Amino acid sequence: MCFDLGGVLVRITVDMAEAAARAGVAIDRSAGSFLDFPPFIEFQAGRQKGDDYLEQLGAWVGCPPSEALAVHNHILLDSYEGTHELIGELNQSGVLTACLSNTNAPHWHEMRQTDRFPNVRDLRLGVASHEVFLEKPQSAIYRRFQDLSSAALGAQIHASEIVFFDDTMPNVVAAQELGWQAHHIDPSRPTAAQMRLHLGRLKLCAPF
């Protein structure tokens, strides 16, 4: 059972001004979106060092690098309601719960190593773009996930056995082309209910 993180398990914002406001950092209000900031994409792909990224982010938005990390980390807002309970049910059922995420080292630490996002922390396997130097929707990252999942279980996992949820349609399509049971999730609506609907059909959890 594989989950994307942002937009599926974790509510996020990519608006720099909103992230800065939540962090309590004064920046240029016209800073724009993280997705339009090339160093952010490079950072998620593991191709840029953290210090260099924060220096460039600080210069872009008009704050010291020491405050840029707080702006960056406040992309992460909170967990979607009901997702922690869903992960718990799946873990108890014996399903291998995992995530496949385009992310970066500070966010990975926040989600996997702290108590801030218990739904993500409780996943049994995590595969992150910055660690494997691959990104969705590249087919190679899905194959890498499949290999790591098989190693974690000590048995070969076939593509058709992987259920995958992502909020970005190209990522869903790429997984489907490899034979995964991939489903699109709308981040503007309760995500746990959408996933339960799909999983209920597979008799893996209660649908509501």
Image: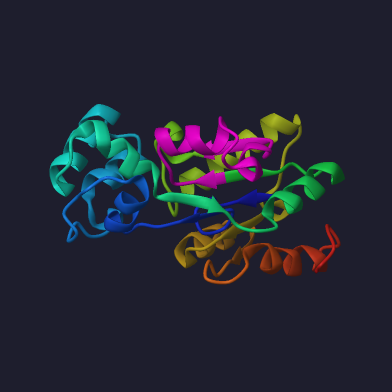
Residue 45, position in %: x, y?
35, 40
Would residue 95 be found to the left or right of residue 187 on screen? right
Would residue 47 be found to the left or right of residue 29 on screen? right
Q: Is residue 122 magenta?
A: yes
Residue 163, position in %: x, y?
68, 56
User: Does 41 appear above or below 156?
Assistant: below
Q: Can residue 94 be seen in the rendering of this structure?
A: no
Given residues 12 and 131, the one toward you in this image is 12
Would residue 57 be found to the left or right of residue 103 on screen? left
Residue at the (49%, 53%) spot, across then down:
6
Residue 84, position in %: x, y?
70, 49
Residue at the (53%, 66%) spot, across then down:
187
Q: Is residue 22 magenta?
A: no
Given residues 179 and 6, the one toward you in this image is 6
Q: Can residue 59 be seen in the rendering of this structure?
A: yes
Magenta range is: 100-127
